Amino acid sequence: MSEFRTMDEALERIRERDGRYDERAYLFVLAALEYSQSRLPERRHITGQELSHACRDLALEHYGLMALTVLKHWGVATTQDLGRIVFTLIDVGLLAKQATDRIEDFEGVYDFAEALEAGYRSPGEPPAEVGGLGAARGREVTDGADAAAGL
């Protein structure tokens, strides 16, 4: 899928296309994609909404109370920003998309400040059900197209 020999080459191409986000935001979205896959019973295509929720969950897990501050420092303040990052990663060949994937899938998935502040929990505290990928656990994959990991 990708012609890059190193991640540095990929990041250079991203900087040439869209410099509005810190490169760590792109790496974070890629990590959130893998994080979301690891929480599913089988690898499959991840929707924009699912990836948005995975980004929220991963940010809270890694950065806790600082999650909103860290993401904003990287230039990420809305789920639309996550969509722009994803579609840049698609444009440079680091991710693949399905025909049904649209950047609009990331619009208004949740309010960043509300989700990142209300969703915080102390280490060891069980997660609150706020619409993350936990709801997808146990769901059977019925469509072969879903089984391919794309987005």
Image: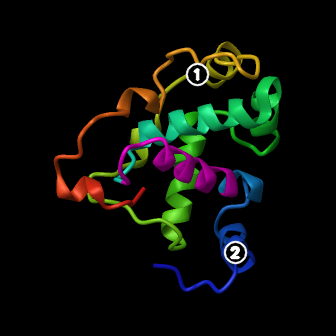
- Element marked by disc 1: loop
Write the residue at 56% across / 14% down. 128
Q: In the image, is 23 to the left or to the right of 10? A: right
- The region drawn magenta spans 27-43
Residue shown at the point (76%, 31%) measured from the top left: 67
Q: Quadrant of the C terminus?
A: bottom left
Q: Secondary structure at mark 2?
A: helix
Which amino acid is tagged 2? Met
Please state which of residues 114 and 81 is positioned toward the viewer in this rendering: 114
Give the amino acid type for the residue marked by disc 1 in the picture: Asp
Q: Relative to 10, is 113 above or below?
A: above
Q: For the residues carrying marks 2 and 1, which lies nearer the camera in this image?
A: 2
Percent x, y of residue 39: 48, 41
Instruction: State whether the magenta stretch is mostly helix, strand or loop.
Output: helix
Quarter where residue 57 is shown: top right
Q: Residues within 10 Å of mark 2 (few under 14, many from 20)?
A: few
Residue in the picture at 70% in, 80% down:
9
Image x and y of residue 47, in percent: 38, 44
Question: Left or right: 13 with respect to 79?
Answer: right
Give residue 111's mark: 1
Badge 2 is on which residue? 7
Image x and y of residue 88, in percent: 55, 61
Query: Would you place residue 74 above or below residue 59 in this image?
Result: below
Earlier in the chain: of badge 2 and badge 1, it is: 2
As measured in the structure, the alpha-carbon distance from the residue carrying label 2 to the one carrying label 1 is: 31 Å
Q: Residue furthest front?
A: 124
Residue 115 within the segment the image draws in magenta: no
Q: Quadrant of residue 133?
A: top left
